Image (cartoon, helix red, strand yellow):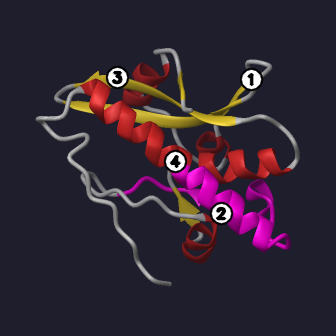
Amino acid sequence: MRRVEFITSAFRGNASVHESQAYLQILLHSLVVLDLAYLRFHPQTPELYRSGVRYHREPQGYEQWLTVPCVVEQRWGDCEDLAAWRVAELRLRGVDAWPCFHWRKFKTALVYHIVVCRPDGVMEDPSRVLGMGWDEAWKAVLSFPALKVG
């Protein structure tokens, strides 16, 4: 597959929280749209929870945003990859789902976790379903309200 990279100043020391979150919303929306297009072109793609894909955290300081075929190929994704895939498949079924995120400043870094939100208020966490463990850092992040993307 051809590699395309977006490199931004977001999430760095000089970027404000608001700037970083604005970029995050745009990137999440874009990933969902790409996954939605892929699933429409490839209707035989297995559903996320039946695909055999697992959650895996990327190394510290390294971040790739993967579309459905890339996640399938490497057999794992992290929170934005899995949440975007799940949102796309729900939208294909007529469910008005969207990615939302929890965030918190943890030590010197902003920590984000992406989940799926539904109009009925249910928050679904594909990362947790697919093997993400819990530690104190994630509990702290999830204690903050989720912010809607879009």
Q: Are marks 2 and 3 in contact (CB under 8 Å)?
A: no
Q: Dot 3 lies on which element?
A: strand
Dot 3 and dot 1 residues touching (CB under 8 Å):
no
User: In front of the other: label 2 or label 3?
Assistant: 3
For the magenta stretch, what is the residue range? 30-58
Q: Secondary structure at mark 4?
A: helix
Q: CA distance from mark 4 to mark 3?
A: 16 Å
Q: Residue at x 12, y 36 (%)?
A: 13
Please state which amino acid type lies under the numbered disc 3. Arg
Q: Residue at x 43, y 29 (%)?
A: 138
Is residue 38 on the magenta stretch?
yes
Label 1 close to label 4 by CB (< 8 Å): no
Q: Secondary structure at mark 2?
A: loop
| Residue at the disc numbered 1 | 122
Q: Which residue is mark 3?
A: 104
Q: CA distance from mark 3 to mark 1?
A: 21 Å
Whichever of labels 4 and 3 marks the residue nearer the N terminus, that label is 4
